[in-house]
Amino acid sequence: MTRPQIMRPWWEKYIGLPFGDGPGEVTCWGLLRAIYAAELKIDLPSYGEISARDLLRIARTMEAHKDDGWRVPAAPRAFDGVLMRGHSGTARVVHVGVLIDPTRLIHVEEASAAVVVPVTHWTVARRIMGYRRHVAA
């Protein structure tokens, strides 16, 4: 008799990925890219070859709701990008995560490996500035 195969949640394999740019490591954008590539078959740009100023421009474009391939969803759902400000309370988007469902997100920061937290968790709740859905999602 064969055992039934247990289906694991899609996000489980990303928990614990370390922050960084090396092999087996991910930045916040790198985690979003990896999830989109593996789970949605959407190839997002790496932005690895552009300057930090251009990365800020891209974040600000997403923040300003400009036509950049991302839309503001009517209601957040799984795989939406989560736009966040920094820990210091800056008014600018400097960090991204990915919604698991409307109540939880996965993200990675320099201070921790990739983790799943409720959107109401003290480490992210005040930082969330909005959600974006890729047009191909």
Image: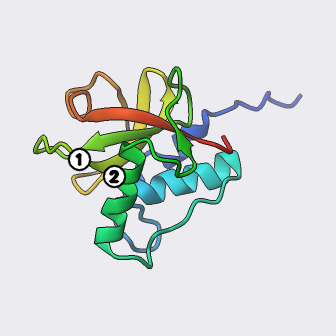
Q: Kindly state the secondary structure of the residue where label 2 is placed.
A: helix
Q: Which residue is situated farthest in the bottom direction here?
A: 49
Residue 131 appears in the rendering: yes
Q: Residue at x 46, y 60 (%)?
A: 30
- Residue 92 is labelled as 1
Q: Residue at x 36, y 54 (%)?
A: 59
Question: Within 10 Å of the Cα at label 2, are there few (<14), some (14-19), or many (20+) other Cα atoms?
Answer: some
Residue 115 appears in the rendering: no
- Residue 14 in percent (x, y) is at 50, 48
Give the camera-side residue of 16 and 45.
Answer: 45
Which kind of residue does numbered mark 1 sit on?
Answer: Arg
Q: Residue at x 52, y 36 (%)?
A: 80
Q: Residue at x 26, y 25 (%)?
A: 121
Which kind of residue does numbered mark 2 sit on?
Answer: Arg
Q: Is residue 80 above or below residue 120?
A: below
Q: According to the image, label 2 marks what residue?
A: 60
In the rendered image, which quarter contains the N terminus? top right
Do callouts 2 and 1 mark residues in contact (Cβ within 8 Å)?
A: yes
- Residue 83 is labelled as none
Left/right placement of residue 120 relative to residue 33 reads left
Q: Kindly state the secondary structure of the residue where label 1 is placed.
A: loop
Q: CA distance from mark 2 to mark 1?
A: 7 Å
Q: Is residue 96 above or below residue 44?
A: above
- Residue 65 in percent (x, y) is at 43, 41
Left/right placement of residue 53 relative to residue 37 reads left
Mark earlier in primary sequence (2, 1): 2
Question: Within 10 Å of the Cα at label 1, are there few (<14), some (14-19), or many (20+) other Cα atoms?
Answer: some
Left/right placement of residue 53 relative to residue 133 reads left
Q: Which residue is situated farthest in the right direction here?
A: 1
Q: Quadrant of residue 49?
A: bottom left
Give the camera-side residue of 29 and 12.
Answer: 29
Give the camera-side residue of 106 and 12.
Answer: 106
